[in-house]
Structure formats: structure tokens, C-alpha cells
Image (cartoon, rainbow, N blue to C red):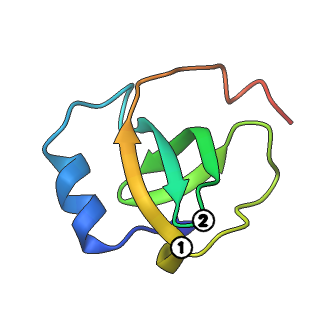
Amino acid sequence: MVKLPRKWITELASKPESGMSYQVVSVTLKGGKRFEQVIVVDGQITKIRGRKDITFTTDEIEQVTLTHEKWDFNAEH
């Protein structure tokens, strides 16, 4: 898990949840790489669709955008 900086936690806290206690966002890194369908729970990135790990640090994050783009993340292994 990766804890988001306060800036993103505050911004996301003012927006609706995508489901019970989570938000689905996209994360854009400073180098331009983008991760779609990222799960944020309680200010922490917990899962990225199609990935087993989180390969970036909070220092690399340029933008976090709420998308609500859901998928059955519990079905993935």
C-alpha cells in the first residue's frame, strides 16, 4: 500500500465514494505514465487493476483523478 500525500487525501475526501469506503481513481506520474483503475481506501492506494504491486512512490505522483471506473477487483488474483 502507498499512503497518499495530504494534498490528495484532502481533495479525495471532498468527493463521493465509488463504493463502500473506496474510490476508483487514475494516477498520472510526473513522467507522464498513467495508471487507470486505482483503488484508494482511507487515503491509501491499495490496488491497481492488472498489477500485483505498486511500482511508484508518492513523490512521482503528478495528478490523482476520481473516475469511479469500477471493476470486480475482488475477483482478480
Q: Indicate the position of residue 15 as horizontal and vertical percent values.
A: 19, 37
Residue at label 2?
A: 31
Image: 41 above or below 68: below
Report the front residue among 27 and 4: 27
Local packing at callout 1 (Cα closer than 10 Å; few below 14, some 14-19, many 20+) is some
- Residue drawn at x 45%, y 39% is 25
**In this rendering, position of residue 65 left or right of residue 1:** left
Q: Secondary structure at mark 2?
A: loop
Residue 60 marker: 1
- The answer to which of marks 1 and 2 sits earlier in the sequence is 2
For the residue marked with disc 1, what is the amino acid?
A: Glu
- Residue drawn at x 86%, y 36% is 77
* Residue 19: quarter of image: top left
For the residue marked with disc 2, what is the amino acid?
A: Gly
* Residue 2: quarter of image: bottom right
Image: 72 above or below 13: above
- Per the model, the C-alpha gap separating discs 1 and 2 is 8 Å
Q: Indicate the position of residue 28 as horizontal and vertical percent values.
A: 51, 52
User: Which circle, 1 or 2, is nearer the viewer?
Assistant: 2
Local packing at callout 2 (Cα closer than 10 Å; few below 14, some 14-19, many 20+) is few
- Residue drawn at x 58%, y 54% is 46
- Residue drawn at x 41%, y 24% is 68
Quadrant position of the N terminus in the picture: bottom right
Report the front residue among 52 and 35: 35
Image: 42 above or below 1: above
Q: Are marks 1 and 2 in contact (CB under 8 Å)?
A: yes
Q: Indicate the position of residue 48 as horizontal and vertical percent values.
A: 66, 45
Q: Indicate the position of residue 65 as horizontal and vertical percent values.
A: 37, 41
Residue at the far right: name it.
77
